[in-house]
Image: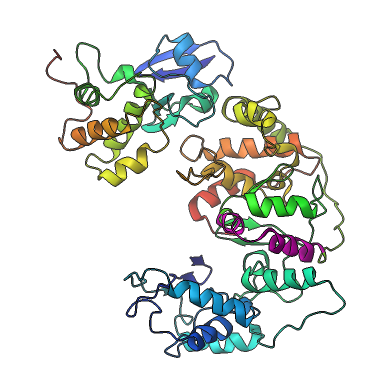
Amino acid sequence: MSTPFGTLYSTNITPDPETGIGTWSLDAFTRAMRRGISRDGHQLYPAFPYIHYTRMSDDDIAAAYAYLMRRDPIVAKAPPNALIFPLNFRPLVAFWNVLFLRTDPETQDGSRSAQWNRGRELVSGLGHCAACHTPLNFIGGEKWGHALEGAVVDGWEAPPLTRLAHGPVPWTAAHLVTYLRTGISSSHGAAAGPMLPVTQALATVPQTDVEAMAAYLFSLQKPASANNGTTSVTAAEQASIRRGSVLFAGACASCHGDKSPMQRIGDRPSLATSSAIHAATPRNAIRMMLEGVPWQGEHAVHDMPAFDEVLADAQIGDLAVYLRATYTRLPPWDGVTQAVTDIRNGGTAK
Amino acid sequence: MIQLTVNGVSHMLDIDPSTPLLYALREDLNLHGAKFGCGLGQCGACTVLVAGKATFSCLMPVAAIGTRPVRTIESLGTAERPGPLQQAFIEHQAAQCGYCIAGMIMRAQALLEASPHPTDAEIRKHMEPNLCRCGTHMRILAAISAVSGSPASVGKPATETVR
């Protein structure tokens, strides 16, 4: 995992005694999940989301332990982390924990439904949605007062979950449940990047749990921010739109055009309501064009070809400008072609 | 006018700039090797090389190509003098209906030019985008492995004729 502080490698959680967690007791496992402390006492880096898992119930932690301990042990040692000084000194994490680790248990809110309480437990605990969807401060802690307001993770924008009603088509709880369980919402888009495996995992959990998550998330909505942008388009943008329309007709329209088979079969997302094209930045639209969604063999999942080797930065940029102008009434994005170059070079650069 | 360099020859074509490269190759340049399969970038029958990269020509607007050279299967050899990959595909009888084969060979060509001795895993990963509905994938993989095991043969015309 690449972070602003260096590269972290996830460790072996199969029950191998030497390189995994084979010798861990349930108590040691629970302490790691709730306090971020390894069996031998060293501090875990908070990329492991113990600040969220601390909200998991005893039963859920015991179930996770039982599941992991029954996997086949695999001998695998993680490569050493490559963190910047002084963060490569693990005990410093203890100070970070003073600021960001809240271990007091969350009590049931009697004024809310059982579904809402279950949703809160899943969203803030096991699901740890905030780990990606909450902006981080300069020392990698989640910004207080900005929970779930959207962030950039692994070079993708994790959109705000507090403004679900503000897109071209407001999300409904039913749409959100369908999206979380299938990776596709006909009126918002298809999951990609780090969100795709989340939806693949949520496909396997009880529907009532996902419904509870949606119910809780909908209770967090904030009022719309004023849209003070201008929709005036410069001459340079007009030229970009013209070039983009030519590229769209040749490279995209066979799937995404209004009359394409994909738009008429099976509730596929339309660009006219795409979250990525209506987003505040072009990041996800660009990454989707560059990387597509890789084919996953026998795993049934939506896919899209990658265009990173086919189209140049300026061409991806023209397409993004064209899509924004054609499918939204929002102001044009700034510096799109430069954003393509930056994303291609750095991936995770903000 | 659109300028295209295909198999080393420059062409000026009076076509819509959004025309996919595949249509220009087949309809304007009479190069019928690359096939129309799905038109969606899902099958690979239309694969050609653009600046050395395996590319779905059905999703490549001619306006996007610029000066990048295009190569099709016609550049690898002829029926009388097949290129090394074509020869290997013949020897392994890798074609059943044959519709996917031009795309398969061009994708394999891109791999072998970038990495002359790929492992079997690398070959499988690289060839993943191309589908064969007859099910001759194992013969296709064997043909590519045969060529990757014979160094320095890639890119040179075959020195002997078949049959």
From what the image shows, is residue B155 above or below residue A341? Answer: above
Q: How is the image coloured?
A: rainbow
**For the point 63% across and 76% down, which residue is it?**
A52
- The mark tally for this picture is 0
Q: Nearer the viewer, residue A143 or A127?
A: A127
Chief SS of the magenta region: helix
Q: Nearer the viewer, residue A301 or B153?
A: A301
Q: Can residue A234 be seen in the rendering of this structure?
A: no
* Quadrant of the image occupied by residue A220: bottom right
- Residue A159 pos. (x, y %): 69, 57
Q: Residue at x 71, y 41 (%)?
A: A186
In-front residue for pair A280/A254: A254
In which image quadrant can residue A230 be found? top right
B146 relative to B158, above or below: below
- Relative placement, left or right, of B140 versus A120 is left
Side of A305 relative to A322 (left or right): left
How far across and how far down the image is residue A58, in percent?
A: 61, 82
Q: Is residue A203 magenta?
A: yes
User: Which quarter of the rendered picture does the N terminus of chain B lie within?
Assistant: top right
Is residue A46 within the magenta segment? Answer: no
Q: Residue at x 49, y 89 (%)?
A: A91
Give x and y (percent) for residue A40: 42, 89
Whether residue B46 appears in this view of the structure is yes
Quarter of the image where the C terminus of chain B is located: top left
Furthest residue toward left = B160
Q: Which residues are magenta?
A: A197-218
> Splitting the image into 4 quarters, where does residue B73 fall?
top left
Residue B49 x %, y % = 38, 28
On screen, residue A278 versus residue B14, left or right, reads: right
